[in-house]
């Protein structure tokens, strides 16, 4: 069984100490997949200075020299990997970036190329800002051959371009839902990689304020029983001492199983 951690929103506004505060005693146990924004445009959240919430100015990650340098060292030490997390992560008046941006194809291509060149890193995974993807956004990511970490399970044709593998995946998810006694409205995380023609998808378990350890343990054990894998997803900028405690107890729980391997999130997609 594989266990991975994804952390979202590393960008120009991130300081190396912000990441070290949360992961300094974690990334030697499990590498952290940093879902990274190449040209962040501010929006209302903790950690982005208020004057940039609505300035609509794009900030290149590489202009934060301390962060660029720290990421280089962390990547070289196999403590972190880098995924693409949108291009600007900006919130449009009509929706989130990969729901409504007019040019998702360009954003995927340019964003990936920028991070690859800046950080000399492989970038093979895409994490949608706010976990939101339109049909066109999904098609743009798939066309680039990037795998998706998220919680995107809609099979509605208005939300997803269908390919030769889609029907089979729909059946697999349906079978899992039925086997666990869930109805269509019950939330769950499907614990296996879903492979499509040009990309693959895997769902994560969220750690946000208010998440209780028992829910994550239940999800972990369910994935285990199903012969699946597990990925935790969080945001460094909102990890409190209580949330960090939940993360560490989950890690300790998973560590008790000899067959659990702690991997970079990219490795969840390995054949
Ligand atoms: Zn985000």
Image: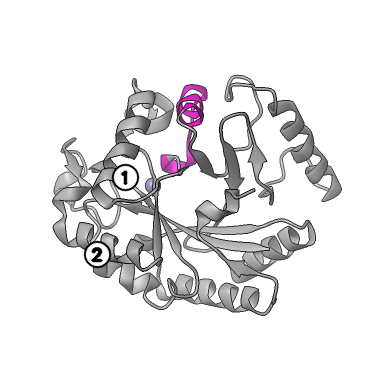
Question: Is 234 colored magenta in this rendering?
Answer: no
Residue 28 is left or right of residue 119, and the answer is right
Residue positioned 69% across, 47% down in the render = 190
The quadrant holding residue 32 is bottom left
Q: Position of residue 165 (x, y in %)?
A: 70, 28
How many discs appear?
Answer: 2
Q: Position of residue 226 (x, y in %)?
A: 78, 56
Residue with the mark numbered 2: 70
Q: Residues within 10 Å of mark 1 (few under 14, many from 20)?
A: some
Q: Quadrant where the N terminus lies?
A: bottom right
**Sequence-wise, which precedes: disc 2 or disc 1?**
2
Residue positioned 16% across, 54% down in the render = 64
Residue 144 is left or right of residue 230, and the answer is left
Viewer-nearest residue: 111 or 216 = 111
- Range of residues picked out in magenta: 129-143
Residue with the mark numbered 1: 116
Q: Would you place residue 204 above or below residue 140 in this image?
A: below
Q: Is residue 194 in view from this perspective? A: yes
């Amino acid at each position: 069984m594989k266990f991975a951690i994804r952390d979202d929103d590393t960008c120009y506004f991130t300081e190396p100490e912000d990441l070290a505060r949360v992961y300094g005693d974690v990334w030697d146990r499990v590498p952290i997949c940093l879902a990274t924004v190449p040209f962040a445009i501010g929006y209302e959240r903790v950690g982005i200075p208020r004057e940039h919430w609505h300035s609509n100015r794009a900030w290149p990650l590489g202009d934060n020299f301390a962060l660029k340098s720290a990421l280089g060292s962390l990547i070289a030490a196999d403590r972190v990997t880098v995924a693409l997390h949108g291009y600007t992560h900006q919130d449009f008046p009509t929706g989130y970036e990969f729901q409504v941006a007019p040019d998702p194809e360009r954003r995927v291509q340019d964003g990936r190329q920028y991070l690859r060149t800046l950080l000399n890193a492989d970038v093979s995974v895409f994490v949608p800002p706010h976990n939101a993807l339109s049909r066109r956004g999904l098609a743009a990511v798939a066309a680039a051959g990037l795998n998706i970490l998220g919680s995107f399970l809609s099979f509605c044709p208005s939300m997803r371009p269908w390919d030769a593998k889609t029907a089979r995946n729909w059946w697999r998810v349906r079978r899992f839902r039925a086997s666990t006694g869930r109805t269509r409205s019950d939330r769950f995380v499907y614990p296996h990689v879903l492979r499509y023609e040009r990309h693959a998808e895997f769902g994560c378990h969220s750690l946000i304020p208010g998440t209780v350890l028992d829910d994550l343990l239940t999800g972990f054990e369910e994935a285990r029983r199903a012969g699946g894998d597990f990925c935790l997803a969080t945001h460094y900028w909102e990890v409190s001492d209580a949330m960090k405690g939940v993360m560490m107890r989950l890690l300790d729980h998973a560590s008790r199983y000899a067959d659990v391997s702690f991997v970079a999130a990219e490795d969840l997609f390995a054949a």
